[in-house]
Amino acid sequence: MRCRDAKEWLSAEQDGELDPSDATALQEHLLHCASCRTFAQEQRHFDAMLGSLKLNKRVTTTPVTPLVRPASISTDQIMRAIQQKKQITNQLEDLRQQQQSRVARMRTAGAVSAALGLLTLSSIPLLFLIVAIIQTDLALKTLALFNGVIDEGIVLGSYVQTGLTLVTRDNLLLSGLAFAVVVMMGMWLRLMRAPQEA
């Protein structure tokens, strides 16, 4: 018996289509041929794996060639895969909505924080005026502490005034400065724009 015939008979034996006389000849060939014996063991191992898959899931096999029997995918498996894809899509959509709601809350909190900060900063001069009216001695002592700072502010103001005078005399320099401010504002507005979804 040739090894090719033995392998075909092994497949027929697995399907239950082998005559008893051929089965005896096949067993005798397997006793003498190590290659076919190894092939038979691999085929049994493969069939055992398929059998365990059939117990866990509904798997149908379609023979393509006598030597290889790949498993086809059942409708239940396809439906389960579709359901899993839908679940994953829903989870991703939920995550996206949660992220958008977090960003919206952060924007609200940022606006509130900015408003409170601006209110606090703008109320400092008003508070100082109230203290100056109610407690004049305390206001004078506080101003005495800032005496050196005020002098430095006056000197700095004179330098700024000189610089502004130079800038305003030269119309070309003033135009360039205005252009730079406009470009920077445009870039800032573009960067602060809400992101667009893909």
Image (cartoon, grey):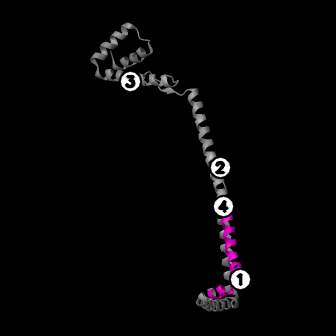
Q: Residue furthest top?
A: 21
Is the C-beta separation of discs 4 and 1 under 8 Å? no
Which of the marked residues, 1 or 2, is nearer the chain's N terminus? 2
Q: Main secondary structure of the magenta part?
A: helix
Mark 2 is on which residue type?
Gln
Q: Amino acid at mark 4?
A: Ala
The residue that mark 2 highlights is: 97
Give the Cα distance between marks 4 and 1: 36 Å
Return the residue at label 4.
109
Which amino acid is tagged 3? His
Q: Marks 1 and 3: which is nearer the front?
A: 1
Q: Quadrant of the N terminus?
A: top left
In the picture of the structure, the residue carrying the numbered disc 3 is 45
- Give the x, y percent position of residue 149: 59, 88
Please state the extent of the stretch shown in magenta in the rendering: 112-141
Q: Nearer the viewer, mark 3 or mark 4?
A: 4
**Given this view, does label 4 or label 2 mark the residue nearer the observer?**
4
At numbered mark 2, what does the secondary structure look like: helix, strand or loop? Answer: helix
Task: Examine the rendering and report whether any part of residue 119 can be seen.
Answer: yes
Where is residue 20? Give x, y as percent.
38, 7
Closer to the camera in the image, 114 or 92: 114
Residue at which label 1 appears: 134
**How crowded is the residue under tag 4: few (<14 C-alpha within 10 Å), some, or many (20+)?**
few
Is residue 182 shown above or below 36?
Answer: below
Alpha carbons under labels 3 and 2: distance apart = 50 Å
Report how far apart the C-alphas of labels 1 and 3 lie in the structure: 98 Å
Looking at the image, is mark 3 or mark 2 earlier in the sequence? 3
Q: Amino acid at mark 1?
A: Ile
